[in-house]
Amino acid sequence: MPSTVVHLALGGLIAAALLRDSFGIRSLAVVAVLVIVPDLDAFAGLVIEGGHRSLLHTLLFPLALAGLIVYDTHIREASWLKTRFDGHGPRVAWVGILAISFAAIGPDLFGVGANIFYPIHDQFYAFDGRIELSNQRGLVQTFVDLAPEPVESGGGSGGGGDIAVGSTEEVHISSGIDPQAGDEPANVERMFPIVRSGQQLLLVLTSIAVVGVRLAESRILE
């Protein structure tokens, strides 16, 4: 599963691409904090069964924040956001919502999954597979089995299957905070991943380079 470092790297790229004139240390920090927030539900797993990847990985979280932004910028007589970041507060907030959705929650849907409709619908969903263009079968995707059938092509490993993997009572997602369900031995290994593949390392390095250049440009223009 992606680490917090990987989530931050993707969030940094989203910020660099979309913040435009509002890009800077402060706005980048806001986006980074918002990207980190969903991972804090790892602590919730200590007191709420299945709370990790549920409490703050629900899509209701960014939807609720989006509702607050709409209320502040379109309904309130005096907008709080419009007075922040030299008038760019709403853009920073909306970019933050996108970062939560696509950099924080999105990557966790691939692999062990996340409980994206919690608490309205208590079910973890996990997407895994591939998309291929075959000269015999046309466009093939195995993320969701719309019409399940054996896949016999040679490139890559498996995919498909049920995307629903269980409720909070059935699924425990290991973390450095809560490695095992129930009581843990005193010598339990607590793993805090940084990167777990070459692709993740490349993403982190790319984000460092892109965000670094954007920060340098923003300082030059000041």
Image: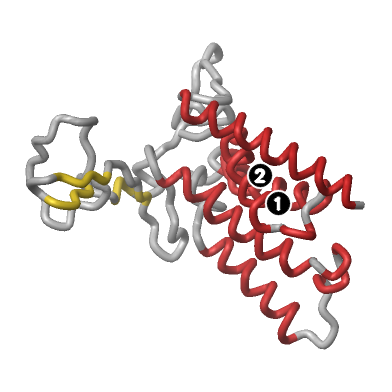
Secondary structure found at label 2? helix
**Residue at (8% x, 35% y) in the render:** 152
Secondary structure found at label 1? helix
- The picture quadrant where one finds residue 207 is top right
Q: Is residue 106 above or below residue 173?
A: below
**Residue at (62% x, 33% y) in the render:** 5
Across and down, in percent, residue 122 comes to: 39, 57
Q: Which mark is residue 3?
A: none
User: Which of the marked residues, 1 or 2, is nearer the chain's N terminus?
Assistant: 2
**Residue at (74% x, 79% y) in the render:** 73
Q: Nearer the viewer, residue 31 or 167?
A: 31
Across and down, in percent, residue 150 comes to: 7, 41
Q: Which mark is residue 12?
A: 2
Q: Nearer the viewer, residue 196 or 52?
A: 196
Tell us which disc is closer to us: 1 or 2. Answer: 2
Q: Which residue is mark 1?
A: 31
Residue found farthest to the right: 222
